Amino acid sequence: MLQLVDKQLAEELAKRINPSVQSMNSNFQQRQTPTPELNTNAVINAHCFEDDTKNPTMRHTPEDTCGSCCTSCAEANSRKLDGILEKLKHVESSSSAKSAETGFCFEKIMSELEETNNVLRSVYSKIPKPSTEGPNFALMPKEKVATMRKLRGDNMNKFALDLERELYATGDRKDLTKPVEKRFASADKVAFIKECVFMFYDVHGEAKRTTWLAVRNALNSRVRRLRSSSKGMSVDCPLLESFNYDTDEQKWSDLTQ
């Protein structure tokens, strides 16, 4: 009897609860929104990615997306990649060429420096060294120098100027427009004048320095007067180019006063 009553109560309770459950299920289903399908095309469209067939995470078929769009994107990326590769090749070749050119220039400079050093050594070897043997009378006979010394008496500056005139009459005339210390091409003649002064005026020891300084100043003074008398003429085309040592005795005398 009790079992029959319990069964009836259960059926009655089920009848009352079932419509509520069904209503709740219906409302829940209506509220649910369909979950979009996650595929490559959706990601590309959402994030504006270009198709990259070489990237496995972005691989898809034309059925999933627009075939013409994917093809154009792939072609654009391929062209960009080709351009980058071409630029890299150009940079590589340019760097190699520049490196080779720099090395060649460096070797050329070193060769020129070595050649210049050889020339300087050759010039230096030809510069007469101070000698204890006195003047090199191959430039001018000793007798002629002695005669000039007698004519000038105790005036060392006049004696040096006369020697200068005679020595440069046969060559190196352009050096007469240069200071004595810059006459590299005629350094042997400068040394001859210096040694003749020391020899014929009996100069020794410490007196040589002060004596030669005074004589050199006299020679350079003549250079300055010559330049001023040229009245703006170029040093490369000095007045001495047309100077006649035989007929212009008075001019030379004026310059050596």
Image: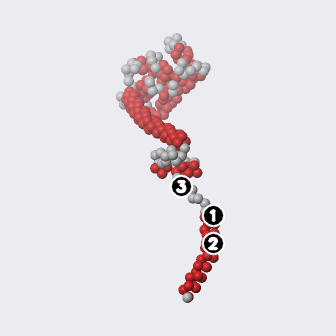
Element class at badge 3 = loop
Point out residue 101 in the picture as x, y percentages from the top left corner: 43, 33
Is 237 placed above or below 10 here? above
**Nearer mark to the viewer, of 3 and 1:** 1
Q: Who's the residue at 41% across and 34% down the image?
A: 100
Residue pushed farthest left?
A: 133
Q: Around disc 3, counting alpha carbons within 10 Å, would you say few (fewer than 14), some (14 to 19), or many (20 or more)?
A: few
Residues at circles 2 and 3 in contact by the CB criterion of under 8 Å: no
Q: Can residue 242 be seen in this view?
A: yes
Name the image quarter holding the C terminus: top right
Tag 3 residue: 38
Residue pushed farthest top?
A: 247
Q: Who's the residue at 39% across and 29% down the image?
A: 115
**Label 1 is placed on what type of residue?**
Arg
Q: Around disc 1, counting alpha carbons within 10 Å, would you say few (fewer than 14), some (14 to 19), or many (20 or more)?
A: few
Tag 1 residue: 31
Residues at circles 3 and 1 in contact by the CB criterion of under 8 Å: no
**Label 2 is placed on what type of residue?**
Pro
Q: In this view, does 255 lie to the left or right of 151?
A: right
Tell me which numbered mark, 2 or 3, is placed earlier along the sequence.
Answer: 2
Element class at badge 2 = helix
Q: Is residue 154 visible?
A: no
